[in-house]
Image: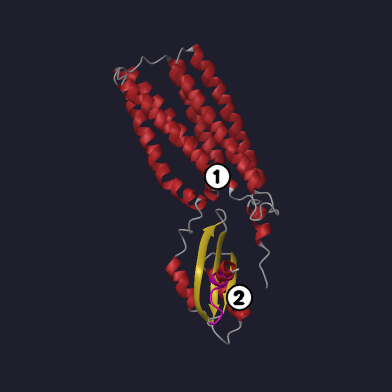
Amino acid sequence: MPHDHSHAHHAGHAHSHGEGLGDRALLWAVVINLCLTAAQIIGGLAADSVALVADGVHNLSDALALVLAFGARKLAARSASPAMSFGWGRAEIIAAFVNYLALIAVSVWLMVEALGRLADPPQVAGGLVMALAGLALVVDLGTAWLTARLARESVNIRAAWLHNLADAGVSVAVLLGGALILAFGWRIADPILTIMISAVILWHIRGDIGPVLRMLMLGAPAQVDDSALREAIRAVPGVEDLHHLHLWQIDERRLSAEMHLVVAEGADPHETRLAVKSVLREHGIGHSTIETESPSSGCADEVGAHAHAHH
């Protein structure tokens, strides 16, 4: 039975494009974020600002998110092995999911903190806090810029990228809140802006986490129309019917299918299978396993199960 052996090499190859450049950008982003974390915590202690120390700890979560994204990217580039026959591509999906969960936790924590401050907004510490918030904004935007190209091609890096944009938003809130407080004495501006930004972050996650969860749950790829695919396969000459069709995503780039194909009497099973594989490729499915049956043989699974039960 002929088989397509290309998928074992594809996992590593998919990440090779611009990998050196992308990895260097990620490493720089991690270093810059760790430096910012240190500056915020030291500055927060000097200015006696709990909020700034908390923001520093939050920024440390960004650095860890980038480390996680970087590690998963390296892991995903590893070749397939007997123990990991599909390769390590799903490491990026798991890392993205962990990053989104962390971002949800941070956003909810920010909202709870802000709600607690609505009743009695604290006094804002002096210019040092605003200066470090400005520095944080520059670093967050710089990190987002460094990882923007990779974010377009990897759901994993996109999660870390969104993490940084969220931080940039928080820094804008601190700056804007500080300006409103200094100009008008509106101490309540800071918690209100924090709640609004947290809501925006959660709204963005709502749209992005769905496809990641779908891949983890072995859901059928959203871009493949199941009924249209079944019709296209049934229209192939020599195909009488199909069943046990399963579609899933190995990782972001690779779709997979398996099915039982009932080949009409007199048709060549090999030629029919090749024609069906061609239809699958037209629908973006590069990896497929097809078991052929004849109308008289019945389903191989049911025949095997019956024989096992009888035995």
Residue 275 shown in magenta: no
Image spot of residue 259 (x, y percent): 54, 68
On screen, residue 109 above or below 161: above
Image spot of residue 51 (x, y percent): 43, 20
User: Which residue is drawn at the image coordinates 34% and 33% (left, top)?
Assistant: 196
**Which residue carries the number 2 mark?**
274
User: Which residue is drawn at the image coordinates 59% and 33% (left, top)?
Assistant: 30
Q: Is residue 76 visible?
A: yes
Q: Amino acid at mark 2?
A: Leu
Q: Amino acid at mark 1?
A: Ile
User: Of residues 290 and 302, which is closer to you in this image?
Assistant: 302
User: Of residues 103 and 309, which is closer to you in this image?
Assistant: 309
Image color mode = secondary structure
Residue 299 shown in magenta: yes
Secondary element under disc 2, as helix, strand or loop, is helix
Q: CA distance from mark 1 to mark 2?
A: 34 Å
Crowd band around label 2 with a 10 angstrom C-alpha radius: few (<14), some (14–19), many (20+)? few
On screen, residue 277 above or below 160: below
Q: Residue 198 occupies which quadrant of the picture? A: top left
User: Which residue is drawn at the image coordinates 34% and 21% (left, top)?
Assistant: 117
Total labels drawn: 2
User: Which residue is drawn at the image coordinates 42% and 14% (left, top)?
Assistant: 126
Crowd band around label 1 with a 10 angstrom C-alpha radius: few (<14), some (14–19), many (20+)? many
**Which residue carries the number 1 mark?**
94
Query: Start and end of the magenta stretch?
Result: 296-304
Side of 142 relative to 28 (left or right) = left
